[in-house]
Image: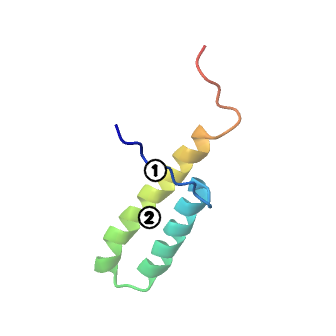
Amino acid sequence: MTQRQRLKQAIPLGERLAQRANQLRAKAMAMPRIEREPIMRKVRQLDIALHINEWLTSPGLQPPK
C-alpha cells in the first residue's frame, strides 16, 4: 500500500480561510451586483468554515467522557 505524502502547511487553516474570504470580498466589491452574488455566497461559506474552525480549536471544547 502506498503512503500519502503529508504537506505541512505554513499558515494555519483559520488564517488561510480569512485571507481567501477577504480576497474574494474585495474582488466582489469591484463587480456588478449580478456577478457579485456567487462570489459573496462563497465568502459566506468561508466565513462559516472559519467560525466552525474557531469553535473546534477553542480551548473550551472538551472531548466527550
Left or right, 30 with respect to 55, comes to: left
Quadrant location of the C terminus in the rendered image: top right
Determine the secondary structure under disc 2: helix
User: For the view shown, which residue lies furthest in the front direction?
Assistant: 1
The residue at which mark 2 appears reads as 43
Left or right, 64 with respect to 30, comes to: right
User: For the view shown, which residue lies furthest in the top direction?
Assistant: 65
Which class describes the residues within 10 Å of circle 1: few (<14), some (14-19), or many (20+)?
Answer: few
Give residue 10's quadrant in the image.
bottom right
The amino acid at mark 2 is: Val
**Number of marks in picture:** 2
The amino acid at mark 1 is: Gln
The answer to whether 8 is drawn above or below residue 56 in the figure is: below
Give residue 27's quadrant in the image.
bottom left
Q: Which mark is residue 5?
A: 1
User: Residue, x 42% and y 56% (percent of image)?
Assistant: 45
Whether pointer 2 and pointer 1 mark residues with C-beta atoms closer than 8 Å, the reply is no
Q: Nearer the viewer, mark 2 or mark 1?
A: 1
> At which x and y percent is residue 16?
55, 62
User: Residue, x 63% and y 41% (percent of image)?
Assistant: 57
User: Residue, x 59% and y 41% (percent of image)?
Assistant: 55
Left or right, 46 with respect to 63, comes to: left
User: Alpha-carbon distance for marks 2 and 1?
Assistant: 30 Å
> At which x and y percent is residue 17?
53, 60
> At which x and y percent is residue 63?
61, 23
User: Residue, x 50% and y 57% (percent of image)?
Assistant: 47
Determine the secondary structure under disc 1: loop
The answer to whether 33 is drawn above or below residue 64 in the figure is: below
